[in-house]
Amino acid sequence: MKHKKHNGPCVAHNSIDKCWRCDPKWADNRQKIAECVQGFGHNTRGGKGGRVYVVSSAADDDMVNPKPGTLRHAVLLPEPLWIIFSKHMNIKLRQELIFASHKTVDARGFHIHIYGGAGIMLQNIRNVIISNIHMYDITPAKGGLIRSSFNHVGVRGASDGDAICIFGSTDIWIDHCSFAGSYDGLLDVVARSTDITISNNHFVRHDKALLFGASDDTPDENMRVTLAFNHFGKGLTQRLPAVRWGFVHVINNDYTMWKSYAIGGAKGATIISQGNRFKAEHGAAKEVTHRNYAKPHEWCKWTWRSEGDLMLNGAFFVNSGNPHWAKQYKGYPLLKAEPAHRVHELTNLAGAALGCRVGFPC
């Protein structure tokens, strides 16, 4: 995983980071970050207003009665919680980590790695923030008897091996996490999930990375996702993201590698790409876009627009649909794009390696 070091005074370049990152007292008011989310997930508050829960153990031994002090015990509790950690941890999940609503997992101040086991499942819930987690080498779990809520224990089937799956959930913010090399997807948004912001993350070493809308037969017209200030780096092939149905705003991201395509989709998805930097790799595909299983007379009606993007090394974006799309979506909580030539600095500290220390700016 990539670790970035920053020397000198704190300088926050993008609008989300400017809200909190240079405050040396960030640890005294951790919940302030809940006011910093922008884009479609702007209503997400996570566990704001709830008590602070300190995870003190990396163990994940009991799927039915998780032990107090573990991450699994924390995320299943029914009340709003702001979950932090007492030390650096390497957590290997035996089964999917299933959340209840109104939770923030705030790993600032420590290196928290979830790797080599199952991933995170946000299923039919709302209002979750996940910040500053490393997730990599996630594998399928066999399933079995597991507590899926505070009051329910049942048999669960095998998991797909996604790092994070957002399934039928609303008001979700994933910020400053690092992802690599899972068995299935790095981050999926499916089953009519909506109002989601994915920001300041670092994605590397994966084939089919981000899937938004998993089924041709289950329309996700309500799906709205903001993808902002992320860095798509080494070893990526495709689905950055791939979109079915819905509306995805791709803004000020840095695409420094893709082998097949960067942004793809089907089923009439609306994709607005603004102020991104697309740098095609030597010997790989130059086209940013890919329409799945569609003939030109079909996809030419899909609104896929590139506005103010920076294309390098022969990269190109094939536009389609309504050039006046903004009139139709007036009133949507869209971020305003910064100039694409600033993308490198806007995303320079993407990922989980902020190195936050109590008493100092991040």
Image: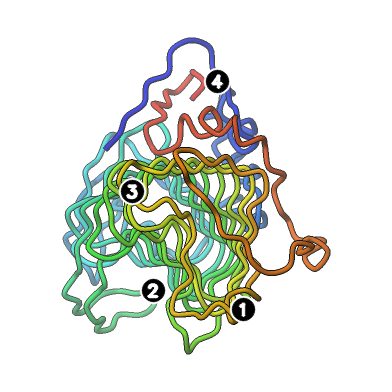
Identify the secondary structure beneath mark 4.
loop
Residue drawn at (48%, 25%) of the image: 362
Residue drawn at (49%, 46%) of the image: 175
Query: Who comes first in sequence, dot 2 or dot 3?
Result: 2
Question: Are circles 3 and 1 on residues that touch, CB within 8 Å?
Answer: no
Name of the residue lying farthest toward the bottom: 217
The answer for how far apart the CA atoms under marks 4 and 3 are is 27 Å
Amino acid type of the residue tagged 3 in the rendering: Phe
**Front label number (4 vs 3):** 3
Identify the secondary structure beneath mark 1.
loop
Question: Are circles 4 and 3 on residues that touch, CB within 8 Å?
Answer: no
In the drawing, what numbered circle is on residue 221? 1
Name the residue that disc number 3 marks: 179
Identify the secondary structure beneath mark 2.
strand
Residue 231 lies in quadrant: top left
Residue 156 lies in quadrant: bottom left
Name the residue that disc number 4 marks: 24
**Front label number (4 vs 2):** 4
Q: Position of residue 64 (x, y in %)?
A: 24, 72
